[in-house]
Amino acid sequence: MSTLTDLSPILIPLVALLIPIVGIIASTVLKVTRLHLLHETVRSLSASGQAIPPELLSEIVGKKS
């Protein structure tokens, strides 16, 4: 039990700093995955000769900026 008491002054700030970092990384991964799926959808629509909906293009262009 004394080991936990000795480590808590180090672990508590470390965990407090890691939580936002993990959140930022997760948000970025989700954003990249979503854009990748949109890109694949546009590629498959254009490969099959179908029209690409303007809403889909505005999603891709809007996420770029």
Image: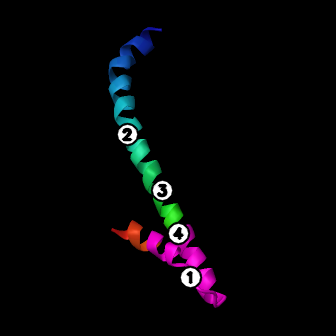
Residue nearer the viewer, 60 or 14: 60
Inter-mark Cα distance, 3 to 1: 25 Å
What is the spatial separation of the Cα atoms under label 4 and label 2, in whole angstroms? 24 Å
Q: Secondary structure at mark 2?
A: helix
What residue would you read off at disc 3? 29
Q: Earlier in the sequence, mark 4 or mark 2?
A: 2
Q: Which residue of the protein is positioned furthest toward the top in this rendering?
A: 2
In the shown orientation, is residue 3 left or right of residue 37?
Answer: left
Residue 20 image label: 2
**What segment is highlighted magenta in the picture?**
36-59
- Label 4: which secondary element: helix
How busy is the neighbourhood of tag 4: few (under 14 within 10 Å), some, or many (20 plus)?
Answer: few
Q: Are marks 4 and 3 in contact (CB under 8 Å)?
A: no
Q: Label 2 sits on what residue type?
A: Pro
Of badges 1 and 4, the one in the foreground is 1
Is residue 9 placed above or below 64 in the rendered structure? Answer: above
Labels 2 and 1: the sequence-earlier one: 2
Of labels 4 and 3, earlier in sequence is 3
Task: Tell me the amino acid under the disc marked 3.
Answer: Val
The residue that disc 4 covers is 36
Q: Is residue 46 magenta?
A: yes
Tell me the residue at 43%/14% (across/down): 3
